[in-house]
Image (cartoon, rainbow, N blue to C red):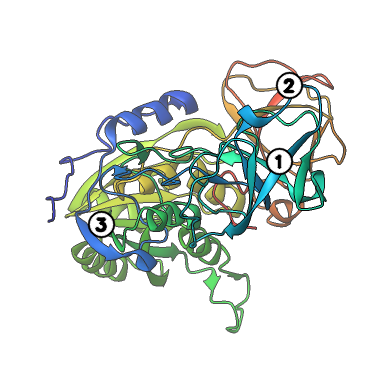
């Protein structure tokens, strides 16, 4: 069964100039919705996809009370409080997949292996190394309590329990839960079709001859790798020259075959920014002058039936804008739940006097070893210093209006991994 795609005529229309970072993210979260339909796929093909419907347990996991240890099973009522207890050891054993068919009476015990169903009449397990065998009898030391080393039926998942919510991006652990419940396939959303391009005559492909004054295109490589961890199917459009006719033809063709176009560079109001001019002429465009550094401005809109996100050209600004804006937008468009903020307070290992408090600042940082894990800044913070991302373990977000930073003060830090970059 498939549901129709959901989209707004212009889901970036709520954008405006001079937005705070906080308001911009709030408006995006409120206004962006799914644009993809769903499909049923074999479990192995669901990795990274967004779940289209809640996954409800239809049985208890574990299905029976079972042993958490290799040991001996017996009824706790047979124990003598505060003293060691001697129990008659029954012949046979209980093993996973091979339950014991008889009943264990009071004063008796049975050898049991990890994962084996608890025999009828038992409720407690003593580990092998804690017990002693004396002339065919099991001696249990004092201190063993009722239900010890027993896994209860439904302890992991109970029948009727929602174990995965709709919109969950499926990782290996989620697929394992589905498999444990016996599912061979799942109802997931299809991958978002994303076209990716860089813009500028100064750019050259890595491995090509570098022209005078040129630079190798790193942004597209970074963004393509970042997209690989998302539920998308990426088409690489390459480097677009500063030629309005070529840019127009490439973007319009891409818009006919993709849900979203993401570009790097050419997202401002310069003479050679043909990307945004094409989108404005043939679609709708909104400049998001977000009060943040780096990452201002952003261009967002629609070209024909495709949505458009234009990222800045400086590498650090481009990636910062992608992680904070484009990534959650892509997840929402692909049917996934809007991700919660990954920023958590860490003690600052630096002092900083803020010269501009009318904007948010994104700083590259790493964590000092040790229990305190103080966040310290990498030395160079300019938006064109790509190596600062290699030196950094994460980002610090100083919100608009916040004051100077004193050493030891809590600052919002998010690791690059938590922001969505695999390392």
- The answer to whether residue 379 is visible is no
Determine whether, in the image, residue 8 is placed left or right of residue 229.
left
Which image quadrant is residue 258 in?
Answer: bottom left
Residue located at (62% from left, 40% from top): 74
Judged by depth in the image, the label closer to the viewer, 1 or 3, is 1
Residue toward you, 11 or 374:
374
- In what quadrant of the picture does the N terminus appear? bottom left
The Cα–Cα distance between marks 1 and 3, rounded to whole angstroms, is 69 Å
Determine whether, in the image, residue 387 is placed left or right of residue 256.
right
> Quick one: label 1 or label 3, which is nearer the N terminus?
1
- The answer to whether residue 233 is visible is yes
Q: How many marks?
A: 3
Q: Which residue is mark 3?
A: 259
Sort mark 3 into few (<14), some (14-19) or many (20+) by Cα contacts within 10 Å: many
Residue 121 spot, x, y in % from top left: 51, 39
Residue 416: mark: none
Residue located at (39% from left, 63% from top): 196
Q: Which residue is mark 2?
A: 410
Determine whether, in the image, residue 240 is placed left or right of residue 110.
left
The Cα–Cα distance between marks 2 and 1, rounded to whole angstroms, is 58 Å
Judged by depth in the image, the label closer to the viewer, 3 or 2, is 2
Residue 87: mark: 1
Which image quadrant is residue 304 in?
Answer: bottom left
> Quick one: label 2 or label 1, which is nearer the N terminus?
1
């Amino acid at each position: 069964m498939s549901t129709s795609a959901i989209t707004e005529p212009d889901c970036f229309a709520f954008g405006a100039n001079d937005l705070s970072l906080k308001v911009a993210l709030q408006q995006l979260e409120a206004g962006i919705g799914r644009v993809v339909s769903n499909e049923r796929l074999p479990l192995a093909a669901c990795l990274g996809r967004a779940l289209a419907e809640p996954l409800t347990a239809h049985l208890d996991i574990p299905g029976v009370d079972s042993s958490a240890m290799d040991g001996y099973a017996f009824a706790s009522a047979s124990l003598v409080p505060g003293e060691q207890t001697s129990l008659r050891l029954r012949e046979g054993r209980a093993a996973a997949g091979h339950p014991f068919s008889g009943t264990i009476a009071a004063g008796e015990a049975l050898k049991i292996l990890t994962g084996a169903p608890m025999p009828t009449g038992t409720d407690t397990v003593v580990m092998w190394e804690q017990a002693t065998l004396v002339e065919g009898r099991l001696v249990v030391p004092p201190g063993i309590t009722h239900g010890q080393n027993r896994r209860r039926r439904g302890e992991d998942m109970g029948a009727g329990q929602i174990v995965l919510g709709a919109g969950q991006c499926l990782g290996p652990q989620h697929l394992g839960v589905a498999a444990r419940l016996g599912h061979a396939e799942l109802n997931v959303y299809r991958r978002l079709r994303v076209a990716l391009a860089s813009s500028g005559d100064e750019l050259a492909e890595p491995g090509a001859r570098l022209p005078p004054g040129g630079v190798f295109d790193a942004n597209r490589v970074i963004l393509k790798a970042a997209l690989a961890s998302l539920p998308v199917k990426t088409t690489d459009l390459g480097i677009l020259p500063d030629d309005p006719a070529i840019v127009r033809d490439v973007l319009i063709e891409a818009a006919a075959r993709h849900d979203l176009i993401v570009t790097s560079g050419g997202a401002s109001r310069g003479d050679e920014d043909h990307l945004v001019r094409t989108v404005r002429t043939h679609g709708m465009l909104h400049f998001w002058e977000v009060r943040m550094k780096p990452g201002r401005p952003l261009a967002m809109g629609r070209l024909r039936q495709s949505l458009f996100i234009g990222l800045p050209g400086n590498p650090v600004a481009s990636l910062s804008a992608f992680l904070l804006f484009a990534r959650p937008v892509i997840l929402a468009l692909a049917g996934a739940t809007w991700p919660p903020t990954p920023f958590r307070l860490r003690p600052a290992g630096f002092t900083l006097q803020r010269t501009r408090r009318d904007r948010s600042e994104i700083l590259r940082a790493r964590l000092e070893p040790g229990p305190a894990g103080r966040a310290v800044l990498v030395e160079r913070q300019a938006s064109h210093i790509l190596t600062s991302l290699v030196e950094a373990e994460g980002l610090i977000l100083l919100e608009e209006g916040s004051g100077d930073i004193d050493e030891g003060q809590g600052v919002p830090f998010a690791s690059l991994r938590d922001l969505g970059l695999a390392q």
